[in-house]
Amino acid sequence: MKILVIGGTGFISGRLVKKLLAKGHTVSVVTRRHTAPSAFDPTKVRFLTADRTKEAELKNVLGNQTFDAVYDMIDYEPGESEAAVRIFKGRTGRFIHCSTVSVYMVSNDIRCPVTEDQDRTPLMKHFPRNPFGMDYGIRKRKCEEVLWEAHDAKTFPVSMLRPTFVCGPGDPAKRDFFWIERILDGQPLLVPGTGDHAFQQVYVEDVAVAFARLLERDDSIGHAFNVAAEEVMSLNDYLRRLSELLNRSPEIIHVDQEMFDTLPFSVSRNGDVFPFNTRRTAFFSLGRIKERLGFRATEFSEWMPETIAWFREKQKGHSNGYEHRHAEIAFAVRWKQGIEQLRKGMNV
């Protein structure tokens, strides 16, 4: 097949391109870079230079080309979806959109396991600290609405994947590294809330496989698919298993969520500085992707050691918020002391 990947050099999409090449497809990649990334063989991938957010640039670099499939991996604004419809309608056999489970998690009411039909439930009151990204989820939901409105089995056949927290070696969000670095420093871990809310990660290679496999199933047309690990863990479970793999036994100190939210080091530009979901249980149905795509997730115990090794050997710089690690530790110690004094007082 002749395939176009818009944004094909990223964390997920770079792996997708390699899997498409391995299947014998002819792949073109739209990127803003003027030189091919070293990770790709320029004799095997055709690179087209354009800014995906500028419709005229994208239209110009594509000319009159048609494609058997187009993957849009970096569509974050509804206007970009509208441009994609204008450019590719009637010019591609498949249009595959990278979405997110955040389209559900900007809603007040979800039913676990969250099924793919829960994408249009009423929005919650705007909550900047939504761990799934409030504005991000709203924008991606609007992107989906544009694409579903344009969906046509003959002229613009749409499919999409909705990944949860995508993790693995090279993760630019460095979610696992946040905890890996703190466990390795040997100091107490400050955990917001009880740590009992359940969540799912997903291994990046599994996501790339799922994207590639969409092309092999015509019954994936017109559908969205959740993609997540089959393992559902609480944050406490995750930290225990991660600590075992690191051969450490850190002290874990839980702090009341409302108190945590007042701490100056608890926020970053993207919301909570602490990664993963600590505010409500959220896990996602995999029935559709297992039935239609034969999806099987790699187990945590298989992919996490590779991820740990990558971060220990290749990661440059610190994890998110680590410049305030001393304040985290100091607060954790004071919080623990306060709880102990309170307990002693109650026993008098």
Image: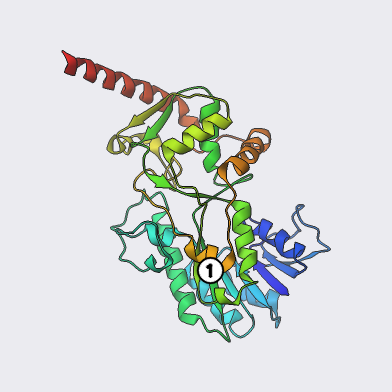
Q: How many labels does the image show?
A: 1
Given residues 61 and 147, the one toward you in this image is 147
Residue found 60% across the figure and 80% down from its top: 87
| Relative vertical location of residue 150 with respect to residue 338 in this rendering, above or below | below
- The residue under label 1 is 160
Q: Which x, y percent locates residue 270?
A: 44, 48
Q: Which colour scheme is used?
A: rainbow
Left or right of 92 in this view: 159 = left
Q: Residues within 10 Å of mark 1 (few under 14, many from 20)?
A: many
**Residue at the top extreme?**
348
Q: In which quarter of the image is residue 86?
A: bottom right
Kind of residue at disc 1: Met
Q: Which x, y percent locates residue 32?
A: 66, 62
**Viewer can see residue 79:** yes
Image quadrant in which the N terminus is located? bottom right
Image quadrant in which the C terminus is located? top left
Q: Quadrant of residue 284?
A: bottom left
